[in-house]
Image (tube, rainbow, N blue to C red):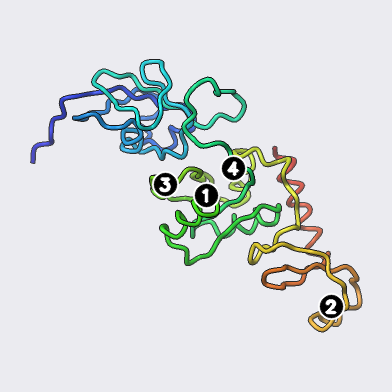
Amino acid sequence: MMQRAYPHTAAFRFYEELNDFLPAKKRKRTLAFHFDGRPAVKFAVEALGVPHTEVDLILINGVSVGFDHPVRHGDRVSVYPVFESLDISPVVRLRPKPLRRTAFILDVHLGKLARHLRLLGFDSLYRNDFEDPTIVALSVAQQRIILTRDRHLLQAGVVTHGYWVRANRVDAQVREVVRRFDLQGAIRPFRRCTECNGRIFPVDRADVWDALEPQTRRYYDAFFQCDGCRRIYWKGSHYIKLVARIQGYLASE
């Protein structure tokens, strides 16, 4: 079967971590995009394998453009990731303004990461039965950043904030997300329930007395409870281990 010949060609170059989405042989080099008609540059970017949520700046022939700008024959297109420290306000920024609060929704592959982000105090919605359409809908309705191991999830047109997690090990994933979204200064440990994502508040011992084991009653006086699932927390031996883990995350930044 003969492959269709397209009449037009544009040159695309992806920069920095956007190359993670490309096959090894296509990284950090100019790619030819063949097309007919006048496709939007957003279509071209995703056709080449890069989710639009990862992109913050596109230059066509040196001029910044929006996602809906058409690609023409002979165009040279430069595609840049989200900028952490460089001010690009004078040009066309492709993503909406940063969300006023940091809240995540995670796909089914990232349950451990969800628990660790909750430990650090971040609102992290996760259920192992969430399907992709549900994740997208909740992301839009609740203005949550999608964290996923499935890059195709980020290609849904209505998604505005999302990130493809590169690391495989959960400790590395936590460091990656904290670094990517510049969250080190926003870490507030032990304010979220690691089980259900509810908020944790101090509670009078008398209010939870009947739910405590005899040894817990004997050795601990300060208790906290989730306002969602009602799970009870206290600073037992596990607390020291968790503090050490959090300090490790902070030290790595």
**Callout 2 secondary element:** helix
Q: Real-space Cα distance between discs 2 and 3?
A: 45 Å
* Mark number displayed over residue 99: 4
* Mark number displayed over residue 158: 3
What residue does disc 1 label?
147
Please give the name of the residue rendered at 37% of the width and 20% of the height, measured from the top-left corner: 60
User: In the image, 67: left or right of 180?
Assistant: left
Q: Amino acid at mark 2?
A: Asp
Please give the name of the residue rendered at 32% of the width and 36% of the height, measured from the top-left corner: 43
The answer to whether marks 4 and 1 mark residues whose Cβ atoms lie closer than 8 Å is no
What residue does disc 2 label?
207
Q: Amino acid at mark 4?
A: Leu
**Callout 4 secondary element:** loop
Q: Amino acid at mark 1?
A: Leu
Please give the name of the residue rendered at 59% of the width and 23% of the height, measured from the top-left corner: 87
Q: Real-space Cα distance between discs 4 and 2?
A: 37 Å
Please give the name of the residue rendered at 70% of the width and 37% of the height, measured from the top-left corner: 253
User: In the image, 248: left or right of 105?
Assistant: right
Residue toward you, 87 or 109: 87
**Which label's residue is closer to the chain start, 4 or 2?**
4
Between circles 1 and 3, the one closer to the viewer is 3
Q: Real-space Cα distance between discs 1 and 3?
A: 15 Å
Between circles 4 and 1, the one closer to the viewer is 4
Kindly give the residue lying farthest to the left in the view shown: 1
Residue toward you, 244 or 153: 153
**Which label's residue is closer to the chain start, 3 or 4?**
4
The answer to whether marks 1 and 2 mark residues whose Cβ atoms lie closer than 8 Å is no
Q: Real-space Cα distance between discs 1 and 2?
A: 37 Å
Say which quarter of the image contains residue 217.
bottom right
